[in-house]
């Protein structure tokens, strides 16, 4: 087995993405503020472009709690619009008229745009901030025959589609990690789609049901989404995808330590509608920055095991551009597009 091929994909930024139909009041009655005027939002709407239970949902609800509990805004209602790796929400964002809206996004959406052939792209939205970075974890049901990551990967190489995996949306971080594992195991990129039996889900709750119900042989998701089930003993963790062991799972080896030269981290952030004014973008950046700097948000990061990956402004714009290029190249290399 060839395990020397490096597949290092550390993806940690917030690409500008979609937002869906919500209504909040912006200064001046909700119309876009002229570029030379100052915008002020007392309320924001938060769009989670996924079903409840996953990492995006956890992020959106943690944001809403901190924003309102700390009085940064008066209200921050959260709505879920699941489907196709966030591209359903992204399509709705195109028609969003309210600038006081934040949509959770991340690496998943970058890949899903490519795999779903989305007509609306990240470049059509306004990036606001990158918030977090998180390793993924490969898990199996509690009674699984697989004791190590090597056991699982070698079985996929040998049996192909007979070994079922589940995770987040097609083309997202979980799907990419599955492909990178096979590539590191010596499978040619063009053969990976034929080997990989991957069931995508639009929310973490669906993947959990498949795994603990023994409907699949393994699953992949962010550590924060599976850690409670690992601690309960309904899942077993085989490896984590960061360069170092995860703080919440200190005894679980990294994928590299397990014998496969793969490092992949997932990022999450927030975007706003495309076409908002500079003043409106600045106000949303102020709101999110104040949230990030609060003790309450830092506590959320520690509780959920999320790394602080905050980025905004010109640096974020540059990251988004580079991230789109990197993810697209990776998807091509492992045969997912």
Image (spheres, rainbow, N blue to C red):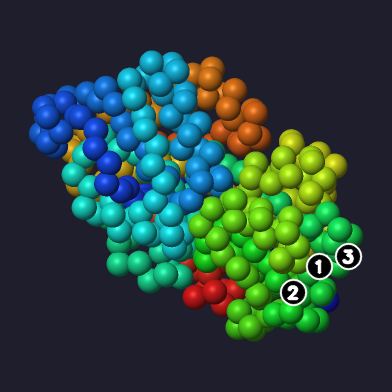
Distance (Cα) linking label 3 and label 2: 12 Å
Question: Residue at position x 79%, y 49% from top?
Answer: 234
Q: Specify whether residue 256 is in view.
A: no
Which sits in the foreground, 315 or 332? 332
SS for tag 3?
loop
Circle 2: is it few (<14), some (14-19), or many (20+) Cα within 10 Å?
some
Circle 1: is it few (<14), some (14-19), or many (20+) Cα within 10 Å?
many
Residue 140 at x, y percent in the picture:
78, 58
Distance (Cα) linking label 1 and label 3: 9 Å
Residue 244 at x, y percent in the picture:
75, 44
Chain-order first, disc 3 or disc 2: 3
Question: Residue at position x 72%, y 42% from top?
Answer: 227
Identify the residue position indicated by label 2 in the image. Answer: 163
- The tag on residue 152 is 1
Identify the residue position indicated by label 3 in the image. Answer: 145
Looking at the rendering, which quadrant does residue 87 occupy? bottom left
Compared to residue 233, the image places residue 330 above or below, namely: below
Which sits in the foreground, 299 or 332? 299
Looking at the rendering, which quadrant does residue 24 occupy? top left
Residue 68 at x, y percent in the picture:
40, 21
Circle 3: is it few (<14), some (14-19), or many (20+) Cα within 10 Å?
few
SS for tag 1?
helix
Label 1 or label 3, whichever lies nearer to me, is: 3
Which sits in the foreground, 250 or 9? 250
Which sits in the foreground, 17 or 142? 142
Residue 150 at x, y percent in the picture:
84, 66
Do the residues bearing badges 2 and 1 touch, measured as CB atoms within 8 Å?
Answer: yes
Compared to residue 69, the image places residue 276 above or below, namely: below
Distance (Cα) linking label 2 and label 1: 9 Å
Image position of 276 (left or right of 315): left
Image position of 99 (left or right of 164): left
């Amino acid at each position: 087995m060839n395990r020397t091929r490096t597949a290092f994909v550390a993806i940690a930024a917030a690409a500008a993405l979609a937002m869906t139909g919500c209504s909040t009041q912006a200064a001046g009655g909700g119309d876009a503020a002229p570029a030379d005027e100052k915008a002020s939002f007392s309320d924001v709407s938060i769009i989670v472009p996924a079903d409840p239970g996953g990492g995006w949902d956890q992020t959106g609800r943690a944001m809403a709690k901190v924003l309102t509990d700390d009085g940064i805004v008066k209200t921050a209602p959260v709505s879920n619009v699941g489907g196709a790796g966030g591209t359903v929400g992204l399509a709705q964002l195109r028609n969003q008229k309210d600038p006081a809206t934040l949509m959770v996004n991340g690496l998943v959406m970058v890949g899903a745009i490519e795999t779903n052939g989305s007509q609306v792209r990240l470049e059509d939205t306004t990036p606001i901030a990158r918030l977090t970075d998180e390793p993924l974890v490969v898990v199996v049901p509690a009674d699984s025959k697989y004791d190590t990551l090597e056991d699982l990967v070698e079985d996929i190489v040998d049996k192909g589609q007979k070994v079922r995996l589940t995770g987040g949306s097609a083309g997202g971080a979980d799907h990419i990690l599955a492909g990178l594992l096979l590539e590191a195991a010596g499978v040619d990129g063009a053969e990976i789609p034929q080997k990989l039996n991957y069931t995508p889900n639009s929310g973490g709750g669906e993947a959990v049901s498949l795994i603990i119900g023994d409907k699949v042989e393994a699953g992949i998701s962010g550590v924060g989404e599976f850690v409670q089930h690992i601690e309960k003993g309904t899942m077993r963790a085989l490896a984590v995808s960061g360069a170092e062991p995860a703080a919440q799972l200190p005894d679980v080896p990294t994928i590299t330590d397990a014998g496969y030269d793969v490092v992949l981290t997932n990022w999450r952030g927030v975007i706003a509608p495309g076409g908002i004014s500079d003043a409106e973008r600045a106000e949303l950046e102020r709101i999110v920055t104040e949230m990030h700097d609060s003790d309450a948000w830092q506590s959320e990061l520690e509780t959920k095991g999320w790394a602080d990956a905050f980025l905004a402004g010109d640096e974020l714009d540059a990251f988004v551009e580079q991230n789109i290029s990197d993810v697209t190249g990776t998807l091509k290399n492992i045969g997912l597009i």
